[in-house]
Amino acid sequence: MQPAHTSKRAFETQPISPSSLKRPKLEPDIDTLEVPVSGPIPGPVGPGRWLGSRDHQFWYSDGNIVIRLEGVLFKLHRSRLERYCTTFCELFATKPDGDETIDGCPAYEAPPELSLQGFKDVLAVLEEPLIYANRRPSQLEAISVLRASETLQCWQPSRLAKTWLSELWDANAIPSADRSDAHSVQDAILMVQLSRTFDIPGVLKRALYELVSSQDFWDTFAKDRPSIALAEEDLTLLLAARIALAEMWQDFVFDVPSTNKGGRSLCLSGLGFKKHGPCSRSLEGGRMASWAGSVLRGGHLKSGARDPLRYNVVERGKEDLKLMWCDACLQEKEVEWKAKRVEWWGELDKVFKLERV
């Protein structure tokens, strides 16, 4: 695992092709069973005993290396592990004969920081390259592959996992106004952590916005700032972003629809087009005061400043606004907000100090 804010590790990779990753023949009847070194599996017995269970999926009859992790044994192909995983390449070079011999093969203990599920997930990517051809992996699966592949310095699966996470936290997709694609604060914090640790810039924009737009996050920030597992630099960045978003929202929300800079109405309903419904006074200053009053009375200044990309002031305040404003004016304001969503989302690259990803 790389420390936060460090440069990406230089490495060379070889492309993974389906033909080169053709799955080896599995040994028949490989139900999980206890495997002592000196027991059912023939082969030289080294010092001590390694009790374990064959993995039901990754025990290949023609494998020539055994990896033991959390009491589970994997019989694999040494050349493939050496080709794709730097950690195993270094381990095999250090101990050519292994820690033990199982089924006639050198056996090694996997790195202790490697999780069993993570190792199996990485093997699945290497051995079955089309496993995710027809479905996108879940966030949990992607993180599992990422952590394990980084531990093993297995760069192809790591790059895939980063791509999956960047798609799940798409920097190009504006957050949905109905919150149907919203992420939790806990997940957003995790994504910022992973991004800083493993260099995944593609997830940062959405993760940071989920945090800056969350009242729960700011409540925790006010009550127990040290409990938030983010670097101080990120907390400072979020504070600055909160102020910037509030300023953007204030400029927008106090901009009166169908009104010139002098405060005079440009709305056609004031010229006899009553089908639009009621509209506010056309006197200079009257429309501005009326609109500002509606904004403040409805609490739209504060609420919208927190989450301007999702806060439709016309929809939220329609009961009050329709008493003084015609449909044409309100529709104009709503159209303006939708255009501002695109503009604001683009400006967040600068606010969050991100390179375009």
Image: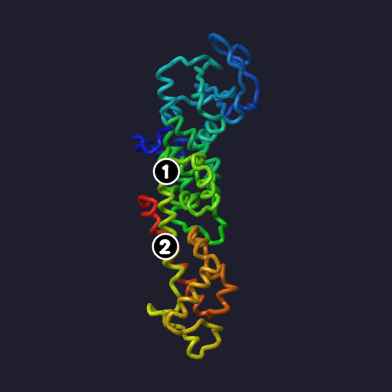
Residue at x 57% of width, y 72% of height = 318
Q: Nearer the viewer, mark 1 or mark 2?
A: 2
Residue 202 vs residue 324: left or right? left
Q: Which amino acid does label 1 sit on?
A: Ile
Which residue is tagged 1? 200
Judged from this view, the residue extending furthest toward the top is 47
Whether residue 317 is visible to the viewer of this picture, yes or no, is yes
Height in image: 158 above or below 266? above
Horizontal and vertical percent position of residue 40: 63, 15
Q: How many labels does the image show?
A: 2
Q: Quadrant of the N terminus?
A: top left
Residue at x 42% of width, y 35% of height = 155
Horizontal and vertical percent position of residue 277: 56, 83
Judged from this view, the residue extending furthest toward the bottom is 272
Horizontal and vertical percent position of residue 70: 58, 24
Per the model, the C-alpha gap separating discs 1 and 2 is 28 Å
Residue at x 52% of width, y 82% of height = 279
Q: Residue 248 got which mark?
A: 2
* Badge 1 element: loop
Binning the other alpha carbons within 10 Å of mark 2 as few (below 14), some (14 to 19) or many (20 upward) gives some
Q: Residue 167 got which mark?
A: none
Horizontal and vertical percent position of residue 230: 46, 41
Q: Which amino acid does label 2 sit on?
A: Met
State which tag comes first along the sequence, 1 or 2.
Answer: 1
Residue at x 55% of width, y 86% of height = 275
